[in-house]
Amino acid sequence: MKRSRSECLPMNFTQDDITTGPTRDRVAIGASLADINPMTIDRDTNFNSIGGLTGHIRSLKEMIVFPLLYPEVFETFHISPPRGVLFHGPPGCGKTLVARALANECSKEGRKVAFFMRKGADCLSKWVGESERQLRLLFDQAYQMRPSIIFFDEIDGLAPVRSTRQDQIHSSIVSTLLALMDGLDSRGEIVVIGATNRIDAIDPALRRPGRFDREFRFPLPSREDRLSILQIHTHHWSPPLKLSFLQELADQTVGYCGADLKSLCTEAALHSLRSHYPQIYNSSEKLLIDTSTIKLSASNFSSALRSIVPTAQRSTASPAAPLSDIVLPLLCRQFEEVLNVLLYVFPPSWKGIGKTLPKLKRERERLKERERTIATAGEDGSMLMGSGIEEIDMSKYITDSFSFQKSQLNDQISNVFFDLDDIAQ
């Protein structure tokens, strides 16, 4: 099977280079290599193809790229570089993309870096002891091909919280992973990266320094980040979209993650294709079309916005139902008062903030002060509430029947993030 031009063997290895050590033994007995072979590195994915996350990229260079380029700095101060990093945040915000870009950046200019990627369930097996053996084999291969990066996607499926109600198999896998990460002594040449959407579901023993030294939270993109993502996905288009239009589009996509914005651009392009060449949908043969005549307009993006449902809204269930004609006259006035208060505190992004901005700043300071005095509850309850707020993090107050208790809500709110730049627009 032909390999893509933009992909290469990790670490610039030849085929003979990767048939060493435990791999050679498995080849001799005809065993499968699917669980230890490193992935090919996509040369088209780099840090320039990531919108926003500037601080995360700078920190990753500091803890992963610099130990490979400047090991003398760490030797001078007799310090060990970080061994692992944990990515967490809502789905579609670039956790896997950053890991792939990091592997590409480390493999430039003749440097040899291997990249191993495993999903949470890839190492699981129905045979007793097989999962632990695959983990040990993976780390052995990464050590022989060092410098290398091991990336565990959806690591909460591999190393969940150990409890008495859990089966013994998962507990043994978690213990094996902890022991393997403690045994890393490669002076920064082996880095373990984990990614998860539910950081509370990971065993706490993995989160201590020495295993996952740093934790990076990937939030929903801000207005500037959304603009950067849209520019990345449309910079090859001809004619290019106007900056003012992209800025307006970024204002209208509050709560969209990076994957949603990519899907939005794809849907807009397909809508333009449908409007320019509708006959291709009625023909089973390939027709000759001129792609230079396909132009995208604001109407294409308007149609795409109506057809795309953001990821944050897809995972939110609402039991709301319209009021009956009998109850409506009794509660209509009270609901209007509540709605007016909410619009005053959280104005839509298209509205001027006027006198509301000082109130929002005071509210934000009050919530920050409250956060310092209470324990952080976690981040498994991320929820989008209107266009004036980017994200609200809540935890463990949602019951199975979605019945919200006021006391629970007040006690369990851990943090509130306001995007004042979006509100100011």
Image (cartoon, rainbow, N blue to C red):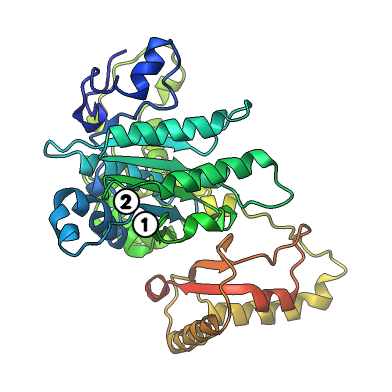
In the image, 183: left or right of 79? right
Which residue is at a point 26% across and 50% down the rendered structure image? 187
Residue 335 at x, y = what percent? 72, 76
Question: Horizontally, is 146 left or right of 37 in the view?
Answer: left
For label 1, count other residues whose C-alpha is less than 10 Å away and answer few (under 14), some (14-19) or many (20+): some
Which one is closest to the eye, mark 1 or mark 2?
2
Q: Which residue is mark 1?
A: 249
- Spatial distance from mark 1 to mark 2, Cα to Cα? 9 Å
Label 2 crowd bin: few (<14), some (14–19), many (20+), radius 10 Å: many
| Residue 303 visible somewhere in the drawing | no
Identified by mark 2, the residue type is: Leu
With respect to residue 8, does 313 lie above or below?
below
Q: Residue at x 58, y 59 (%)?
A: 380
Circles 1, 2 touching at the beta carbon (< 8 Å): yes
The secondary element bearing badge 1 is classed as helix
Give the residue number, with chain letter if any, for mark 2: 230
